[in-house]
Amino acid sequence: MAFVIAEPCIGTKDTACVDACPVDCIHPRKNEDDFVTATQLYIDPVECIDCGACVPVCPVSAIFALNDLPEKWKHYAEINAKQALMAVVSKAEQNQR
Ligand code: SF4
């Protein structure tokens, strides 16, 4: 399981969750290149340790345990996973240059 950031993050991108995460698996951080262009923040499902520390600090209640994701936002699990994967690929490409 992993936690997932859903629709309320769009247009908000508050980074309290980033600061609360003990394993640094919420991206992009404010100092990362894609922060400005990112639609929302996302959680890397592979790195997430399911501690729940990010949930209470989100000002718009955008973060849910996978099993608690409201039906209308189920697709955000895939969005988070896809964004995490794209970030890994992008970093690998940058390292090859
Ligand atoms: Fe990070 Fe814990 Fe939230 Fe997972 S549940 S994103 S590990 S703060």
Image (spheres, rainbow, N blue to C red):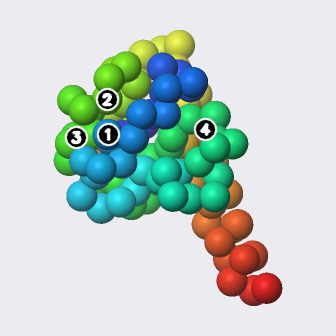
Task: Give amino acid for label 2.
Answer: Cys
Label 3, label 2: how many angstroms apart (C-alpha)?
11 Å
State the SS at label 3: loop
The residue under label 2 is 58
State the SS at label 4: helix
Give the mark nearer the N terminus: 4 vs 1. 1
Dots 1, 2 in contact, CB < 8 A: yes
Q: Look at the image and tell me in which quarter the C terminus lies.
A: bottom right
Give the mark nearer the N terminus: 4 vs 3. 3
Dots 4, 2 in contact, CB < 8 A: no
On the image, the x and y values in percent for residue 58 come to 31, 29
Label 4, label 2: how many angstroms apart (C-alpha)?
18 Å
At x 50% / y 43%, what residue is drawn? 42
Task: Give amino acid for label 1.
Answer: Ala
Local crowd size for mark 4, using a 10 Å CA cut-off: few (<14), some (14–19), many (≥20): some
The residue under label 3 is 52
Task: Give amino acid for label 3.
Answer: Gly
The label number, if any, that marks residue 79 in the structure image: 4
The label number, if any, that marks residue 16 in the structure image: 1
State the SS at label 1: helix
Q: Look at the image and tell me in which quarter the N terminus lies.
A: top left
On the image, the x and y values in percent for residue 53 come to 20, 42
Label 4, label 3: how many angstroms apart (C-alpha)?
19 Å
Residue 74 visible at all: no
